[in-house]
Image (cartoon, helix red, strand yellow):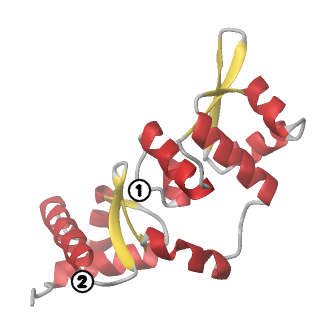
Amino acid sequence: MVEFVDEDLRIEAALFSAGKPLSIAELERITGIGRKKVKEALEFLMEEYASRDTAIEIVKIGNKYSMQLKDRFSDLAQELIPTELPKDVLKTAALIGYHQPIKQAKLEAMVGHRVLEHIRILEDMGLVKKKREGRYMVVRITPKFSEYFGLGTTDPEEIRKILAEKAGING
């Protein structure tokens, strides 16, 4: 059996308590542990959780680390966690994540006139951003999108595959 040292336990406690992904710099600040030890502890904890038969995992999302439920338990969690986003806004978020980058006009054709309100809500949460490209407004997800939805990646193709799988379609 591998033995945890104090630094590992402090990093584990910080990840558990945060309820959101944390960067190495944030973990340094919160725990008072140096960068090298934080990285070592994260690698150790990721391997340790991956080797256990447990519902929890520690994953790297972009440049941050998160303690979260493994995908196979996400349905159970959905029953217990209140949804912050209304279903129609959640649907718009999924469409943006799947089709990104997507022209706002195309999204409006898919969702309807309320899409502008949905985009504003998602922008206010930091989940999407829109930018003028030529004559069109184009909407993309931000790294926070992956963190918020626990996707474990910021790669657009991987996100598309994950969303297709969750929706039961072939991406």
Q: Secondary structure at mark 1?
A: loop
- The label nearer to you, 1 versus 2, is 1
Q: Looking at the rendering, in which quadrant would you find the N terminus?
A: bottom left
Residue at point 73% right, 50% down? Answer: 91
Image mark for residue 152: 1
Residue at point 42% right, 72% down? Answer: 70
The answer for how far apart the CA atoms under marks 1 and 2 are is 22 Å
Q: Quadrant of residue 61?
A: bottom left
Residue 30 location (% of width, % of height)? 34, 70
Q: Could you tell whether 22 is left or right of 85 in the image?
A: left
Q: Earlier in the sequence, mark 1 or mark 2?
A: 2
Disc 1 marks a residue whose amino acid type is: Gly
Residue 131 location (% of width, % of height)? 64, 24
Residue 128 location (% of width, % of height)? 62, 41
Disc 2 marks a residue whose amino acid type is: Leu
Q: Secondary structure at mark 2?
A: helix
Of 77 and 11, the residue lying toward us: 77
Image mark for residue 114: none
Residue under label 2, please give it: 9
Residue at point 17% right, 84% down? Answer: 6
Residue at point 58% right, 80% down? Answer: 76
